[in-house]
Amino acid sequence: MGPDDGAEDAMRLDEDGAAEVLARAVDGVRPPTPRLVDGAVRRGRRLRARRRAGTAAAACVAAGPVTAVSLWGGAPRSGGVEPRSPTGRTDGGPGPVRVPDFSAYPSTAEAVPPGKERISARATALALKETLPWDLESSQYAGRNQAGKWLGVVPYDTSARLRVAGRGTDGEVKVDFQSQFYAQMDDGTDGSPRAGLEKWYACARFRAQDHVRRCEVARLADGSVLLTYEKRSGARASRHADLLQADGHRVAVGAQAGAGGEPPLTLGALRGVVTSHRWRLFVDPEVNERAKALKPFETLGG
């Protein structure tokens, strides 16, 4: 990874974060960008050129440490592939990330509170659409939720997918929203779900054949745990963000590139999607009702 790559990644994350904040502020209303873009692009190019110049100068001064250790831990490998972080990162820096203890939580599906409904598959697709960066267009909506007959036995799961285009690329974005994920991850080693969850939310679980190029785990300020990673194998590329919410629910979003292209969302944008406030198991009936306007929508089986 060259000295400019880290700065470039950071700038992309800043841009994605700004896009996410803007999208929430305008609540999906897209501004008339043609009159605004030209001047902003010119100023942005000048600013980026100055930042790159400063980054290059700093890299020359600190060339020894930069070439000895990569951002993701360990020495850089041949071919520009970053090694996986073996322990993840916490808010305080490198170190193991410990997941919450859900051993006292219920293992059966939660009862629906009065005046609420479980989020529907169509509402899941709408939530995914509305949490994407505002400059991406979406289409071809599809989704599924777990059959009602199972609700008293296992937690409720719903998923959705859609096609996106924009930023000179296209591809597919998928989301899995799984309630009480801890109840599905008890590996039986210590009688609690924590061991299974800590194996799942760890970069060490990926094998060489998984083709993971970069991976990081973080404990967020609200107690949730976030795993982000990128996969690359030949012309195929995808990026993923997997969030274990503090209440034990899971939101996992993946962006798959179109033919020969880059995934339509960066890791920073995916983080913005999974940490959105819209991912709630129980919603007002109006949320599911409003989602019925999302068309065309394909109900998936299984």
Image: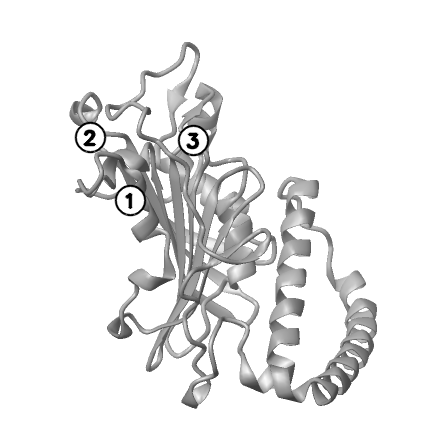
Q: Which mark is residue 147?
A: 2
Q: Which x, y percent locates residue 212? A: 36, 70
Q: Secondary structure at mark 2?
A: loop
Mark 3 nearby-residue class (10 Å; few <14, some 14–19, many ≥20) = some
Residue at 33% x, 33% y: name it. Answer: 179
Q: Which x, y percent locates residue 137? A: 52, 56
Residue at 42% x, 27% y: name it. Answer: 288
Label 1 – label 3 distance at C-alpha? 17 Å
Using the image as rendered, state which of residue 105 and residue 8 is in the foreground: 105
Callout 1 touching callout 3 (CB < 8 Å): no
Give left or right: position of 188 versus 131.
left
- The residue under label 1 is 195
User: In this picture, is 95 found above or below 45?
Assistant: above
Give left or right: position of 11 versus 220.
right
Q: Amino acid at mark 1?
A: Ala
Disc nearest the viewer among 1 and 3? 1
Mark 1 nearby-residue class (10 Å; few <14, some 14–19, many ≥20) = some
